[in-house]
Amino acid sequence: MPNPLHLFGFDRRVRARRRRAVPVPTALPRTDAVFLVMRRMRAPFLVVITTFSFCTAGLTFIPGTDGQGNPYRMTAFDAIYQMTMTVTTVGYTEAPYAFSYPQRMWVMMSIFLLVVSWAYALGVFFSLLQEPAFVDAVATQRFRRRVRRLREPLRSSPAMVLPAAPSGAELDERRRRFVVLDNQRSKVETVATEQFAADVPAVEGDCRQPAMLGVAGLDRPTCAGLALTDDDSANLAVVMAVSVLRPGVPVLARCSSHVFQDRMEQFGPEAVINPDDRFGNYLALEMLRPVTHQLLMWLMDNDENHLPAIRNGLGRGRWIVCADGAFGDLVTTDLREAGVEVDLTHPRDGAPRDSGITGFVSGTDDDIVNIALAEQVRLTNPEAHIVVRQKNAANKAVLAYLRVDHVYIATELVAREVLARTLTPVFWRFAELAVAQDEAWAIALRDRLVERLRRRTPDRDLLTLSMADAPGLVHWLSRGMPFTLGDLVRDPGDRSAELPVVPLLLARGDDILITPGSDVPVRVDDQVLLVGSGEGLGPPRGGPALRRRRGVCRYRPRGPHDLGLAHPHRRPPRPSPGRRRLRRPTTRRHPRTRRRPRTRRLPTTRRGGGDRHTDCAGVAGSAPCHPILCFPIAMATRGRVPIAPPSRPHSLSRA
Amino acid sequence: MNLEKVVFGFFVLLAATLNFGFFVGDIADARVHNVWELFLAVVVNAIATVLKFDRTQLGAVHLATSLVALLQLLAATSVWIWAVQVSADGLTPTHISSVVSLSGGALLANIVSVVLLVVETASFRRR
């Protein structure tokens, strides 16, 4: 059996050259809308000023009479008043006295002159407001302002395309802020119809321009780049700009060809996702390790679906791939590497009429043709595993009523992988390690998860046992008291009850322990990846439980009884001012946490903050209390990601 | 020779010279301050300001000087009009001196503008 690690290309990872941070450009030539207007309005302004002053001066020179017939010449102010009325086409009186005939002749000429110049100026002004360049400039300026106003840790996703809308909606649902930058107006406009909970700044712009990325927030302390356009060279430009200008910032890119994948990997991005290639990998994994595949799909699922059905025996028998582009080659190569017999046919030859095939991939570039081919094959092969490739979910209604086993949509696959890597970065390490485990391990873990969490897709969260996130536990551990993972997943209110939470992975510096047992003792600065159902991990859902869980946030044990073993609901007394320094969990680091393991810290804006443990709703406006130990939801932007390569993380698990 | 630059220099300089012409003379003597010169100074300053809207040609400081000059001259004109049209005493030495002093402020701004123009021209030649 081929090594699945090799199959997924987990072992090919290029380390980028070390670069130093440089200032990110944010100046765009077209952002100064006001100056654009002023420049274009120069000629109209000059015409109005010239004609106005000419007519005003002329009027004062022309002799007139006052009411008694005495000679009277208008003062400068009279003339300006008269011309002001005339230029705005109001002109309702002759002031201060009725005009003489020469004055009337001059005013008549002035009316024609001034009205024309006025109309010209207004015409230019209003056409300027409609002009695309001006509209773009205003939109860019507004976008810049809105991005500047984002105060929370920003996951900037430059060039996020809306076919990847699932990832946008998911990011929004997890209260992660993002911005959208796309060069197609239609895609940008769909942001408005997406009904995101948070304000999502979106602009039409060229993500190839580094300054545009700067405007989109690349210079912000915390951000990540998601280059998800369907244009490879644009994605490459984003990867390049992000990795050169902001070396520490993770960037994830989509690409569709090996050539561009190699080019992107030279810059050391967090991930390059070629959806067609990855689809072949997943299909091969499903054949070789059905349960591992089932488990990963279940944990990575973002639609809160139930445990997917499993199909055994897909690796036996013959597969047919019907495709006309590079997709067919990629999939057949992957399947052959997995040791599966596979034939590639071209759609112009029609649907394969063979019967008795195990599986069929309908992968032409035309969505409708794919559905038709799948239906034809289904007639001759009622039992075959049929996969249909689609560009988007437009035909969902049709596909729901056809007997299709799997629908492959590239943007959904990209969204799933991107979210798996960004929402909880450690989760991807788990996925990598899971593929390296054997099938028995996957079966055991799946059964355990189903038993504990039932079949609904669990949420996942990363818990860091640091002074900032778990002050109580750090105090406890720093006094040498024992605490195991099993203690961690018990209800703080009722220590005899276990929360519906399962630890998937324990990261201690470079060491990673996958599916740790409940007797494993935890240490300060450990990171624990947990999966669990909503009541175990998610924000408290109101009611009395809310109050109780808020109490957990102030939880600072000073002895076994304070740990909740004897008095579960006991809260620590209010610290008196004199003892405040000793008792309050402060932003100051605990001495033990100074010995940091070799980990990479993602850029961060807000650190520590003991204050938020007294009121956990204060973080990002919506951070929930953790039922075990308080930590804010924007975990991944603050959390540390172990960067050990996947080839040597097993020292703990082997021990 | 760039015609645009000629026009630009012409108006910037003319704004300063007209302003100066109005300003010179006894500050309280209305006979040596011609109102038509003030009127022309306002108009030419407005034109110079509009010409400076082109940000690529000259800096924002340039535009700022013109705006200052225009504002001062408009204030001077307002005082003049108030004195002639509204004030019961007509154009008193108090009025005319405040008009001239306001135009003196505008003159300073115009001089700065001209200096900027000269500096730019000189540095342009050196390149």
Image (tube, rainbow, N blue to C red):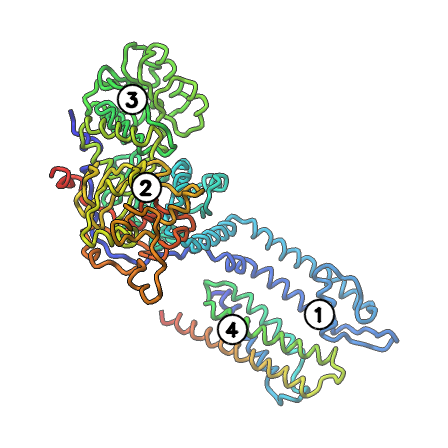
> With A318 as the anchor, is A45 left or right in this view?
right
Residue under mark 4: which chain is it in? B
Query: Mark 3 and mark 2: span between their CA atoms?
Result: 37 Å
Amino acid tagged 4: Thr
- Disc sitting over residue A310 in the figure: 3
Q: Are marks 2 and 4 on the same chain?
A: no
For marks 3 and 2 on the same chain, the one whose residue lies earlier in the sequence: 3
User: How many numbered marks are there?
Assistant: 4
- The one of A511 and A605 positioned closer to us in this rendering: A511
Spatial CA span between label 1 and label 2: 86 Å
Q: Amino acid at mark 3?
A: Ile
Q: Is residue A509 above or below residue A444?
A: below
Indicate which disc residue A80 carries: 1
**Is there one chain holding both mark 1 and mark 2?**
yes
Of marks 3 and 2, the one in the foreground? 2
Rendered residue at 24%/15% (across/down): A318
Label 3 – label 1 distance at C-alpha: 87 Å
Tell me the chain of label 3.
A
- Residue A629: give its label: none
Residue type indicated by callout 2: Asp
Query: Vertically, is A125 above or below B44?
Result: above
Q: Does dot 2 land on a helix, a strand or a loop?
A: loop
Residue type beneath disc 1:
Ile
Residue designated by label 2: A494
Q: CA distance from mark 4 to mark 1?
A: 25 Å
Label 2 or label 4, whichever lies nearer to me, is: 2
- Quadrant for residue A230, please give it: top left
